[in-house]
Image (cartoon, rainbow, N blue to C red):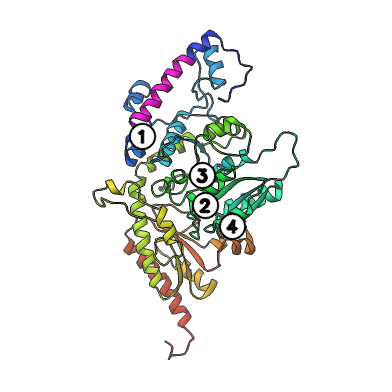
Amino acid sequence: MFTSDEIKITPGMQRYIDKNNAYLAKRDQYIRDVVKKWKFDTIAVHGLYTVQDALEDYQGAIIEPIFMSSSQAYRDADEMAAALAYLIPTWCYSRIANPSTYYYEWTLALLEGYGFKGDTSCCSTSSGMAAIMTAVQPFLVHKRHHVHEPRNFLATAQCYGGTFQQFKVRMMEERDIECRWVQNPANIDEWASQIDENTRFLYGELPSNPQQGFFDIAAVADLAHSRNLPLIVDSTVATPALLRPICHGADIVVQSATKSLTSSGFGICGAVIARKNLICRVDNDDLKQDFALYVKYLPNRDYGPNLHPLQAIMTLNDVRTLRSKMDMLSRNTLKVSEFLSRHPQVERVEYLGLPEHPLHELASKYMWLVDAEYDEQYGKPVNRYGHLMSFCVKGGVEATRKAFDGLQRIWRATDLGRIKSVATIPAISTHLQQGEAGRQLAHIPPNLIRLCVGGEHPDDIIADLDQALNKVKTKTAVGTPAAVR
Ligand SMILES: *Cc1c(COP(=O)(O)O)cnc(C)c1O
């Protein structure tokens, strides 16, 4: 794979190749016979890092080592030639690969592929935006000598503000690649009617940030495959602890690992996870065979949006407890959203976990706490909806800002997925650049507050929200007739 025909394999190179093939066969057998049989939590805690790895190579370190080194040395010319031709596993240069990012990639590939019958692989990236770029660009290449051919793709209009900008400004305005927005992605006909012979992929975010958009993954995946197209899903808000789109037919998942996967808030990072043997209209066998490894070893080698090894291990440390954390945060969020939906200063609450949400039933088909049936506490499957929610404050923009400014425990920041509760007003922050028309397209009114409930006791978060919202009530009451008061 990824090797040009020009390479002459010397007997010395062949010895290295044989040795490494034996190593790879052993590793793949270990994955098949041992790791794939573990429960989710065990994979999250250990990934592919073994006691044997530690004792043989890393002086017994129980945590995966952070390899800050820029590059790797080789024993001789044969080993170097084999490595740089990608004929043996190597990390040669940290822009291309690195042992610390290797463990990160395997853990995320295995978690996102948990319960999936086929194989998955992962390419780490320096951010969620870099993951999206990495996932979509390879499908937008021109056929040789056809530089003027029109190209388009479909994407859910309800998406992260950065994604909206990447697709609208960087693709449409700067590169003339048409992004066809899907306004109501729960309507499969809206997807179907926008696909034509120049479409390259379908892209969907779910649950969407901040408005809790959702769609039927299996139905959209079936549609995509029937037209020879891949489906790419941004599953940042759910994380693999609550939803694994590849198990439902999606081909590629992008993660802003910055968010819930790094709930401590230490840094920025991303990942592209793909199933093997993709369906697509691009004529490139390496790409189809193993998309994540292809982008890792070729396009990302040339563009360089790669993850730092220190960041990889910091994120891995947060991922080890992902399942129980997402359970706790989801339960806290449900409690807070129930409180807010009863609050007189709140116009409406958007949370997929609330039975009155129009997409509750659809989301309940897909969003389950992984392994709840093996959990002593539950012993059966339970739905969990994550820790992103939003609500609209009564009284317009001014009342919204007042309630927001009144928060004392909840942090005002354009952030989410934290162990600390965080709130933002998307219209003046994450979704500011896209303008009023863009916000209308994405259903983001100016009085919407996005709230990400953390690991505090939910009673304390509820008390903070209550005092902030009650400040609005008192203020608007001033100056109104005594009878009303
Ligand atoms: C934050 C976010 C991104 C972008 O990720 P970065 O790590 O900030 O680059 C993409 N998608 C979603 C849903 C996000 O919340």
Q: CA distance from mark 2 to mark 3?
A: 9 Å
Specify few, some or many for label 1: CA neighbours under 10 Å numbering under 14, 14-19, or 20 or more.
some
Q: Which mark is residue 205?
A: 2
Give, as a three-letter code, the residue at label 4: Glu
Q: CA distance from mark 2 to mark 4?
A: 16 Å
Question: Could you tell whether 25 is left or right of 283 in the image?
Answer: left
Q: For the residues carrying marks 2 and 4, which lies nearer the camera in this image?
A: 4
Q: Can you see residue 386? A: no
Specify few, some or many for label 2: CA neighbours under 10 Å numbering under 14, 14-19, or 20 or more.
many
Which one is earlier in the sequence, the residue at label 1 or at label 2?
Answer: 1
Ligand 1 contact, mark 3 (Cβ < 8 Å): yes
Tag 1's secondary structure? Answer: helix
The answer to whether the residues at label 3 and label 1 have Cβ atoms under 8 Å apart is: no
Q: Which mark is residue 254?
A: 3
Up the image or down, 34 lies above or below 159; here it is above
Q: For the residues carrying marks 4 and 3, which lies nearer the camera in this image?
A: 4
Q: CA distance from mark 1 to mark 2?
A: 27 Å
Give, as a three-letter code, the residue at label 3: Val
Residue bearing the label numbered 1:
36
